[in-house]
Image: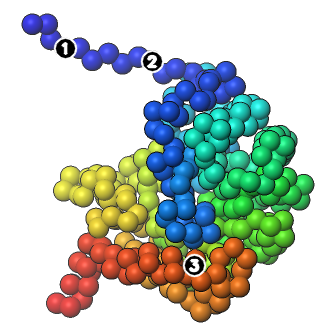
């Protein structure tokens, strides 16, 4: 019997997105079986969150945040096509609108996530998509998409997005300390954050903010600054993460070069150590004045505290679209978060107890 031989093809150049049919795979997964996240639906009951789809309009991102590995799938293709690193490719807006129409008309989808890392960077692209969706469906659908503080400050774009049913922007703040934040290619100031989020809200769009604890340069004081900023912004949704040196990111490359003990080390927990909610989670801590257990414990406490604060709950009770039903939904999953177990935190507590 001939011995099996594994052949590896050379990297293929990145495709032209406007030449690829977008609809062919949707029947294989049937998006009617999927549900949108709670906050996306203004914390509606689970039965009201079906179905859900996430069509792309852009691949790639031109920015260079150390923790981000979004460009990893595109690296070989960029080199094969002699393209610049951190390429940024657009689907033709009319094809995206046709894909949305297909999902609505074939599966009855109402909830959409646009998972582009940089949906809002090119205003003409966003306007063409928003105007195409509004012309076809008015304000009957429910979208959310990512945005940056330094790309979302475009009034005409914001108005067009809201008219097309884009009801949420996910905005990455990352850190409350401006020096720590600038190290992640986010050089905007606190005043910019408040001004832009205010402008997004004035357009009728809600904001979900994201923050990361344990970034290079962090200590306990700067992490408290990050959480204080989150509370001051008091957005109807906020995500809190620990820094991870994810494969394909600049942090991962530096960690490997410096011999940092990554989760996949011999004797380590393996890839599960990169999981934000895993029992074996091990946050990245190089360049901080913190231990992994300190970062993880801080994150878990912040997550529960944010959604149980009186200021947050009072805001949600009176904010249009939320109310008591939203608070009941939040309470259910916060109760689950209170009991989240973490190995490195338990080990650190055991050592202190001994």
The mark lying in front, picked from 2 and 1, is 1
Question: How crowded is the residue under tag 1: few (<14 C-alpha within 10 Å), some, or many (20+)?
Answer: few
Task: Identify the residue shown where x is 23% and y is 14%.
Answer: 5
Position of 353 compared to 82: left or right?
Answer: left
Q: Alpha carbon of mark 3 to alpha carbon of mark 1: how far?
A: 59 Å
Q: Quadrant of the C terminus?
A: bottom left
17 sits to left or right of 107: right
Identify the residue under disc 1: 4
Q: Quadrant location of residue 80?
A: top right
Lower sequence index among marks 3 and 1: 1
Give the alpha-carbon distance from disc 2 to disc 3, as whole Å.
54 Å
In the image, residue 86 above or below residue 214:
above
Secondary structure beneath label 1: loop
Q: CA distance from mark 2 to mark 1?
A: 19 Å
Q: Position of residue 304 (x, y in %)?
A: 47, 82
The tally of labels here is 3
Instruction: Name the image quarter holding the N terminus.
Output: top left
Between marks 3 and 1 in the image, the one whose residue lies nearer the viewer: 3
Eyeballing the image, is 67 above or below 329?
Answer: above
Residue 259 x, y percent position in the rendering: 34, 54
SS assignment at label 3:
helix
Name the residue nearer the viewer: 190 or 105: 105
What residue is pinned by disc 3?
Answer: 325
Q: Residue at x 59, y 92 (%)?
A: 310
Q: What residue is pinned by disc 2?
A: 10
Q: Which mark is residue 29?
A: none
In the image, residue 30 sits, relative to residue 188, either above or below, namely above
Which of pointers 2 and 3 indicates the residue nearer the eye? Answer: 3
Can residue 59 be seen from the camera position used here? no
């Amino acid at each position: 019997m001939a011995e099996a031989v594994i052949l590896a093809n050379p990297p293929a150049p990145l495709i032209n997105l406007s030449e690829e049919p977008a609809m062919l795979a949707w029947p294989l997964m049937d998006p009617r079986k999927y549900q949108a996240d709670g906050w996306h639906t203004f914390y509606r009951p689970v039965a009201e969150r079906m179905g859900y789809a996430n069509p792309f309009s852009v691949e790639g991102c031109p920015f260079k945040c150390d923790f981000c590995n979004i460009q990893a799938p595109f690296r070989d293709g960029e080199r094969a096509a002699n393209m610049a690193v951190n390429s940024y490719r657009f689907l033709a807006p009319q094809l995206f609108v046709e894909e949305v129409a297909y999902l609505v008309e074939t599966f009855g989808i109402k909830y959409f996530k646009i998972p582009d890392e940089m949906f809002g960077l090119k205003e003409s692209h966003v306007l063409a998509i928003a105007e195409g969706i509004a012309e076809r469906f008015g304000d009957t659908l429910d979208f959310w998409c990512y945005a940056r503080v330094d790309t979302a400050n475009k009034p005409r774009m914001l108005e067009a997005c809201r008219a097309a049913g884009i009801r949420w922007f996910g905005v990455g703040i990352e850190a409350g300390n401006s020096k720590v934040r600038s190290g992640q290619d986010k050089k905007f100031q606190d005043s910019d954050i408040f001004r832009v989020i205010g402008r997004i809200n004035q357009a009728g769009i809600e904001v979900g903010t994201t923050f990361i604890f344990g970034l290079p340069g962090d200590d306990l004081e700067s992490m408290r600054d990050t959480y204080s900023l989150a509370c001051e912004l008091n957005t109807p949704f906020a995500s809190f993460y620990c820094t991870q040196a994810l494969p394909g990111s600049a942090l991962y490359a530096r960690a490997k070069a410096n011999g940092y003990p990554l989760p996949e080390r011999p004797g380590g927990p393996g890839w599960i150590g990169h999981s934000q909610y895993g029992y074996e989670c091990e946050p990245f801590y190089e360049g901080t004045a913190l231990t992994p257990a300190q970062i993880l414990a801080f994150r878990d406490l912040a997550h529960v505290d944010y959604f149980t604060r009186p200021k947050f709950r009072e805001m949600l009770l009176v904010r249009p679209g939320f109310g008591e039903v939203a608070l009941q939904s939040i309470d259910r999953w916060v109760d689950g978060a209170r009991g989240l177990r973490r190995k490195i935190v338990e080990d650190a507590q055991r050592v202190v107890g001994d």
